[in-house]
Image (spheres, helix red, strand yellow):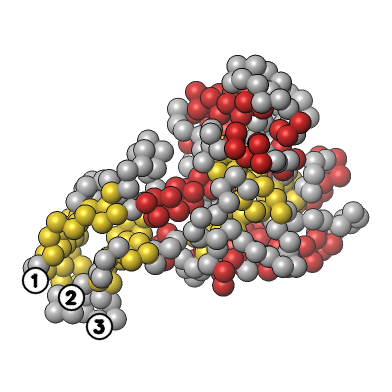
């Protein structure tokens, strides 16, 4: 919790979860729409899809289409950037936004094209081949708010911290499968290893990120190709396990973009308390951030005085509600609010 004053705090993670977790899918392949989408949607999970814009609609290999990404975007998934041509950025000259074959072009043009198609800001990036350098980090940071890299050592997992993560070098975990896979059973040790890597984010109160490439039915693994391709059977088992973690309140599972927004809004939020009397509390949150990008609700805990049995809560653009606080332990009122969205009014009844 980040305490703003004696009675109002912002939860470290959304809805008081103990850690955050993001699914990420690389390369914009068609299996993401065919196989990943229904598995995520059945559990109300939203993922981040890193598109290589120059490959879309190419009909080459397993390339997906803009129409597929537009549908994923409409369902609330995040469409993010994996550059235009999937280059190793440290090997390119810095160049200009408008000069193909340069690092600036790869970063700027992919972002601009996705933004033009989807009509919303693109804030997340994944370096192709997870190839980075300090110079690339500095350049990428002028276009994007966060970059996902690899790097988690599953034997000694250290997840992204809840405060001040390395924004241009976020750690992720990639499940590595055996060279010979005769039946879905051969992948089970990797499932256990993946669960334990993700679960370690809970005691660390950190942010776990899973890196996935293609996902196809086990029977298609050999013919579909791809790098560390997961089977739909394996991915479904993992999602079933994650669903239990989510439903128990241990994990907040959301897109990389929304977790990025949450951290930045939470750490920038300031309290403006306009009234705190025997009868009412009136306050707003402000953070000075750009609302076109930062629209993620924060989970705010308000301590209600012990003698207030019922309260009326009025929040901008939400239906007013009356809440009974009969039990002594239920002295905390939880609100979801976007900073800068106006004043909350809590009145004793
Ligand atoms: Zn890639």
Residue topped by disc 2:
305
Mark 3 packing: few (<14 Cα in 10 Å), some, or many (20+)? few
Mark-to-mark CA distance, 3 and 2: 10 Å
What kind of element bears circle 2?
loop
Q: Residue furthest top?
A: 99
Residue topped by disc 3:
328
- Residue drawn at 67 percent across, 47 percent down: 149
Q: Is residue 272 positioned above or below 106 on the image?
A: below
Query: Residue 145 placed where, x, y %?
Result: 51, 41
Q: Residue furthest bottom?
A: 328
Q: Quadrant of the C terminus?
A: bottom left
Please give left or right for residue 294 compared with residue 44 in the image.
Answer: left
Q: Quadrant of the N terminus?
A: bottom left
Q: Are marks 2 and 1 in contact (CB under 8 Å)?
A: yes
- Residue drawn at 15 percent across, 72 percent down: 310
Q: Is residue 328 positioned above or below 178 on the image?
A: below
* Label placed on residue 98: none
- Residue drawn at 37 percent across, 64 percent down: 2
What kind of element bears circle 1?
loop
* Label placed on residue 278: 1
Mark-to-mark CA distance, 3 and 1: 18 Å
Residue 110 visible (yes or no): no
Query: Residue 98 placed where, x, y %?
Result: 60, 16
Q: Nearer the viewer, mark 3 or mark 1?
A: 1
């Amino acid at each position: 919790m980040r305490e703003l004053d004696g009675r109002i705090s912002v939860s470290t993670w959304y809805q008081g979860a103990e850690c955050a977790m993001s699914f990420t899918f690389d390369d914009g392949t068609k299996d993401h729409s065919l196989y990943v989408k229904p598995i995520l949607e059945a559990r109300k999970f939203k993922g981040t899809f890193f598109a290589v814009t120059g490959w879309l609609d190419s009909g080459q290999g397993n390339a997906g289409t803009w129409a597929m990404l537009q549908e994923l975007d409409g369902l609330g998934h995040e469409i993010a950037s994996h550059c235009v041509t999937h280059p190793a950025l440290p090997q390119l000259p810095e160049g200009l936004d408008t000069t193909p074959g340069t690092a600036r072009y790869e970063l700027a043009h992919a972002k601009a094209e996705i933004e033009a198609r989807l009509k919303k800001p693109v804030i997340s990036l994944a370096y192709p081949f997870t190839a980075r350098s300090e110079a690339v980090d500095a350049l990428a940071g002028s276009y994007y708010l966060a970059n996902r890299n690899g790097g988690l050592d599953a034997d000694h997992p250290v997840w992204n911290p809840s405060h001040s993560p390395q924004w241009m070098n976020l750690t992720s975990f990639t499940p590595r499968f055996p060279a010979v896979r005769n039946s879905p059973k051969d992948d089970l040790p990797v499932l256990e290893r993946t669960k334990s890597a993700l679960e370690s984010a809970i005691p660390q109160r950190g942010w776990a990120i899973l890196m996935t490439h293609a996902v196809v039915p086990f029977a298609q693994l050999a013919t579909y190709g791809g790098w560390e391709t997961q089977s739909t059977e394996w991915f479904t088992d993992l999602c079933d396990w994650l669903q239990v973690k989510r439903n128990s309140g241990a994990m907040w599972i959301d897109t990389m973009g929304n977790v990025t927004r949450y951290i930045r809004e939470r750490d920038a939020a300031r309290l403006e308390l306009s009234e705190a009397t025997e009868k009412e509390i009136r306050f707003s949150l402000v953070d000075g951030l750009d609302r076109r990008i930062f629209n993620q609700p924060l989970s705010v805990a308000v301590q209600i005085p012990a003698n207030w049995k019922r309260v009326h809560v009025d929040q901008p653009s939400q239906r007013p509600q009356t809440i009974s606080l009969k039990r002594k332990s239920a002295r905390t009122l939880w609100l979801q609010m976007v900073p800068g969205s106006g004043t909350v009014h809590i009145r004793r009844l």
